[in-house]
Amino acid sequence: MKPIFTALSLLLLLSGCSPKVLHGQTAARTLELDAGTSRAPIQPTMYGIFFEDINFAADGGLYAEMVKNRSFEFTLPKTGWLEPNTDPFSLNARSGKSDIIKTARDQANVNFLRVTVKGPDYVLLNEGFRGMGVKAGADYDLTFDAAVGAGDIRQATFALIDTAGNVLGQTTVDLAGAERKEYAGTIRSRATAAKARLRVTFTGTGVVDLDMVSLFPRDTWKGRKKGLRKDLVQLLDDMDPGFLRFPGGCIVEGRTLARRYQWKKTVGPVADREYLVNRWNTEFDHRPTPDYYQSFGLGFFEYFQLAEDMGAEPLPILSCGMACQFNTGELVPMDELDPYVQDALDLIEFANGDVTTPWGKVRRDMGHPEPFNLKYIGVGNEQWGEEYIERYKVFNEAISAAYPDIVIVSGSGPFPDGEFFEYGMQQLTDLGAELVDEHYYRSPEWFRENATRYDDYPRDGPKIFAGEYAAQSVAIASPDNKNNWNTALSEAAYMTGMERNADLVVMTSYAPLMAHAEAWQWTPDMIWFDNLESYGTANYYVQKMYANHAGTDLLSVTEGGEPLTGREDLYASAVKDTERKELYLKVANTGREPQRLSVDLKGARAGASVRVLTMASDDLEAVNSFSAPTRLSPVESTVSLQGNTLDVTVPSHAFVVYTFTLQ
Ligand code: AHR
């Protein structure tokens, strides 16, 4: 055999062909797919969602409030509010004025707007979050607090207007009484507009105080009043996510400790939630968004509720007493850590405690007496160094003592290798950490070359949570990064490696999740939206294909007894779902040639028809967009099984999921 093989190889070499292509005909590669032996259970948490309020993902995004700075609490309290033509001689200025009044009312909502109306032409506008998206025939629910002062102001009219000033719909609300109270109305829009604004005018003259001016689409996720944007949650829900990690990301840490995320300030009545400037507002010179704040209308209760709606495990991440080390790196002294640890303990009580406990009662008062069944809690985001480890130990001890069943998620820093990573991982392993979060924002090549990353990880150390990852087409945090097919295909290839190691890797999530097309700071992102529409990127569809075919048991798929980890551009993993009685074979072909496969199914019998979901494009720069939202998305077909053999051709630059029906 040997001389013949050598002669053939020489012939191929001389003809300039790769070994698998002869006269344009690709030889089939034989894969053995063993459906009989479960190698490991696939955890239901395997494919989940990482949510962070970056890129206007919460206010101006998922949280459907349309009025920016509804309670006048931004640092510049009139941000978002316009009085057209402030020239003192203008008609508007002659017709009225507005002033911010600071009260000592409470800590959270100190400002209101005092409007003095001198004539019918006075106009106040709210610009929304880069405008307001309104749809023809849809209803918008208005609420606001008002107190009528001196004069005879009898009515306020709220109108949605388009950029030309045309009224799209309006409501007039009668006002009465010097007591501050809540008023409500509904505006039905007669047309669709992407950049509407809310115009406020008054009947009568005098003084009126306004606060909490709020406008929401009625059509929210699950029809909840003042709820979440339906299209965006739908995209998330369609993924069948195994968990929802919130609220970030670096936003957990804050640039300074004072500006860290404090969950206790995000629950209870919405009007009492203290505003906080968003840490991403001016983080990058390339995308400053100084008007980026957190109203916390989407707070911890709403995150838990969202996780519950989607059947996902909630995974809150808390500050461990360290501000972002890329910014100030401020540290809470070790002997002052108690309040931070108490926040973690109280959060577990808020989520799971009986309604007779102080924090369980808060949950009940918000309308959820049943526990949220929290199982995981994260200590710190992507901290590194000794300072992290010593703080982690304190949290670990306190949480484990009070709640031994809660799994503590610790972090290995911002990079997947190097000094911080090695140190953190070693320390956490020595401390017996259960689940360690890894982050990697690397090139597409890195993803393709590291599909074997977990093959040699120790099995007696912590389990792995790949909590933030995304292939960067240019460089980390470059504003030129694109969600192109090259990045998504490279992630798909890499993910076969995570899946093959599902005994170790038990949670994974792409990051960041969402971006407003006109207000983002960080790219790439899994989902893009504007005020009217949203679309999933190629990366989203790859995530969805994995999550929708997560399975319950890991199987082995090999070529010549070896796993497929990039040899001649092919990557593969396989799982079966014992409840659905299905088997999912995932194959990524990162090469320029189609690949013929002959898959031998062993250890089970399957129905003749195999469902095929294919994402493929030879244009590696291709992206989805508002005008072509599904350009890169799975295309469905079927193929027949011959006996127990599947003969298929995987297109070039393709990711394919084959679904076998087990008998
Ligand atoms: O996903 C964007 C940021 O990247 C996250 O906030 C942070 O954890 C990471 O550095």
Image (cartoon, rainbow, N blue to C red):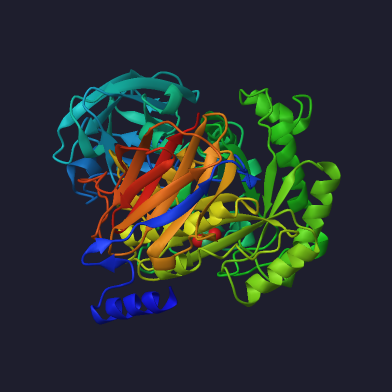
What percent of the width, then of the height, locates residue 495?
A: 49, 55
Q: Quadrant of the N terminus?
A: bottom left
25 or 462, which lies in front? 25
Q: Give the residue displayed 60% in from the left and 55% down from the top.
A: 501
Instruction: Give the image quarter of residue 621.
Output: bottom left
Q: Relative to 179, does residue 79 appear above or below in the rendering?
A: below
549 or 147, which lies in front? 549
What percent of the width, then of the height, locates residue 4?
A: 37, 75
Instruction: Give the image quarter of residue 154.
Output: top left
Q: Relative to 198, does residue 59 appear above or below in the rendering?
A: below
Q: Give the residue displayed 25% in from the left and 49% down from the top.
A: 625
Q: Is residue 75 visible?
A: no
**93 relative to 515 in the view: left or right:** left
**141 relative to 434 in the view: left or right:** left
**40 relative to 286 in the view: left or right:** right
129 or 156, which lies in front? 129
What percent of the width, then of the height, locates residue 57?
A: 43, 47
Q: Give the residue displayed 13% in from the left and 40% down from the top.
A: 164
Q: Is residue 190 visible?
A: yes
What percent of the width, then of the height, locates residue 510?
A: 48, 53
Q: Give the residue displayed 36% in from the left and 55% down from the top.
A: 520
